[in-house]
Amino acid sequence: MSTPFFSIIIPIYNGLTHDLPVCLNSIWNQSLDKKLYEVICVDDCSTDGTRQWLKEQREAHPNLQVIENQENIRQGGSRNRGVKAAKGKYIIFIDQDDYYHKEGITLAYNHLQENNLEILIVDCAYQSPGKVSNELQHNFPHREIMSGDEIIEKNSIPYAPWKFIFLRSHMIDNNLFFAENERIEDIDWVHKLVHYAQRVQYQPILFIHYNKTSISTTMVAYKSKEVIYAGLNMAARIMDLTENCFANSNYNVKTYISNLAIHHYYLNLRNYFSFYDNARRKANMIEQYIKTNNNKSNSIVIFAQRFPRLFSITSNILSPIGQFALYLYRSYKYKKH
């Protein structure tokens, strides 16, 4: 096989249960010459027969490579393995329960052939399973080629890794690997990826159909204390970016990154009121992860940072009310989709 233009990497866990065949078919059905791309499925210890099914798929698709993890390393670790094994010039990610828009990959290929980009940011449509949508989720106004910091300042950037098509060398040369064994590994990663690039462009290409389901991390965050603690850890990693890779960025960009961290501190601390746990454990998580300047924080972050034990006890007392309020809110919000 000649050197492919794209390496399409799919982290997988129980893919047969989560629409992996639909995802793969959306790739095989693109009109793009199959010599121009390889597909790398990284199976993270599936238990539903996915591994055997993928072995059978390899016989029909010579450009399919399957990597089998010996232990569960989550999406970030699986993506890292896929990138290291990739041979393509550009990397594309997708999740197993989403699928590509018809000719989305072909349109991206044509655009990259005409423009020398380190990163192409594409768009997606959010939808519920069985309810197809073609409405662009972002449709950012600035579409010129910019540096990473410029595009963060002018457009902001999406969080999902599968909205970025980027040079493999950019990730490898700058050591931009995902945090492994983390439940939430992508938000800090995408900002690092974009920051280190000098030629980044957004284009309103409908690339991926993202299926909102009841099992996604964002949908179950308010139900799982482990996801909430992982969210605090993720926010701490974002705050660390202001002191390392964004240390020499302009004031607006650094403020944006700092505010992003505080925003996610707030979201996860708010979810403290939706679950009960040992108050000391809750307080320890706050003390371990919250790193912020009080002058830039909102009231709930300041309260938690200054009085972590009191905040934890208060959240435990109010957790039944919080659970009910979030149930009503989520039921109303997602009933509309």
Image (spheres, helix red, strand yellow):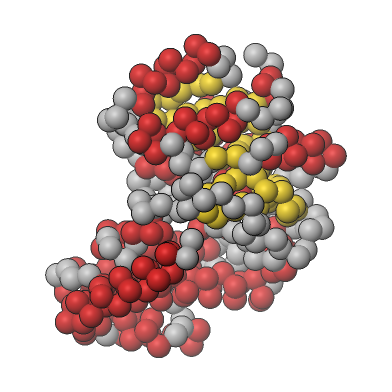
> Is 31 on the left-hand or right-hand side of 181?
right
For image coordinates 35% across by 36% down, the residue present is 17
* Residue 154 image-quadrant placement: bottom right
Q: Residue furthest left?
A: 278
Residue 233 in sight in this render: no
> Is 267 on the left-hand or right-hand side of 160?
left
Q: Work out whether 95 lies above or below 223.
A: above
* Residue 194 image-quadrant placement: bottom right
> Is 172 on the left-hand or right-hand side of 45?
right
| Residue 21 in the image, given as x and y percentages of width and height | 47, 30
| Residue 111 in the image, given as x and y percentages of width and height | 79, 41
- Which quadrant is the N terminus positioned in? top right
Residue 31 in sight in this render: yes
For image coordinates 25% across by 73% down, the residue present is 323
Q: Work out whether 106 lies above or below 275.
A: above
Q: Residue furthest top?
A: 59
Total marks shown come to 0
| Residue 177 in the image, given as x and y percentages of width and height | 51, 44
Q: Work out whether 10 lies above or below 328.
A: above
Q: Residue furthest right?
A: 114
* Residue 93 image-quadrant placement: top right
For image coordinates 56% across by 49% down, the residue present is 132
Which residue is at the front of the view, 262 or 210?
210
For image coordinates 30% across by 77% down, the residue present is 325
Which residue is at the front of the view, 194 or 321?
321
| Residue 222 in the image, given as x and y percentages of width and height | 32, 66
